[in-house]
Image (tube, grey):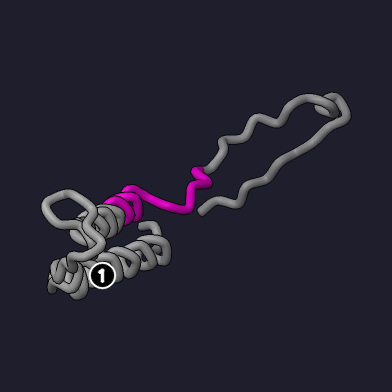
C-alpha cells in the first residue's frame, strides 16, 4: 500500500478537495438477503396465526358458541416458532459482517 500524501498550498485554500468517497453502507447484499428471509419468516408466522376468534362459528359471532380452533397446533406452536426464527434471522443479518 502506498502512503497517501496531500499537499496544500495557499492557492488551493477555499477550493473543494476532490477525493473519492468510500462506500459507507454498513450492510452488504448478503445482509439484505438475510433480512428479507427473516421478514418472510415473520410474515408467514403471523399469517399462520390468523383465523376465527373464540366466539365465531361459520363466520358469524355467536356468544353462546366456543371455537376450539384457537388452540390448534398451528396457532399455538408453529406460528410463534416461525416468528421467533424470523427474529433470530434478523439479528443474524444485522450482526453479520459485510465481506
Prevailing secondary structure of the magenta residues = helix
SS state under label 1: helix
Residue 28 % position (x, y): 38, 50
Is residue 45 something one can see in this rendering?
no
**Picture quarter with the C terminus:** bottom left
Residue 59 magenta-highlighted: no
Residue found at x 83% / y 32%: 9
Residue 32 % position (x, y): 34, 50
Residue found at x 75% / y 38%: 7
Residue found at x 42% / y 66%: 95
Where does label 1 land, which residue?
80
Q: Residue furthest right?
A: 10
The tally of labels here is 1
Residue found at x 20% / y 57%: 56
The stretch in magenta equals 23-37
Q: Residue furthest front?
A: 64
Report the front residue among 9 and 76: 76
Amino acid at each position: 500500500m502506498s502512503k497517501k500524501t496531500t499537499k496544500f498550498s495557499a492557492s488551493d485554500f477555499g477550493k473543494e478537495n476532490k477525493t473519492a468517497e468510500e462506500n459507507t453502507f454498513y450492510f452488504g447484499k448478503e445482509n439484505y438477503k438475510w433480512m428479507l428471509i427473516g421478514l418472510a419468516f415473520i410474515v408467514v408466522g403471523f399469517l399462520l396465526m390468523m383465523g376465527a376468534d373464540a366466539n365465531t362459528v361459520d363466520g358469524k359471532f355467536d356468544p353462546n358458541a366456543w371455537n376450539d380452533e384457537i388452540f390448534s397446533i398451528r396457532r399455538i406452536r408453529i406460528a410463534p416458532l416461525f416468528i421467533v426464527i424470523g427474529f433470530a434471522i434478523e439479528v443474524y443479518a444485522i450482526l453479520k459482517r459485510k465481506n
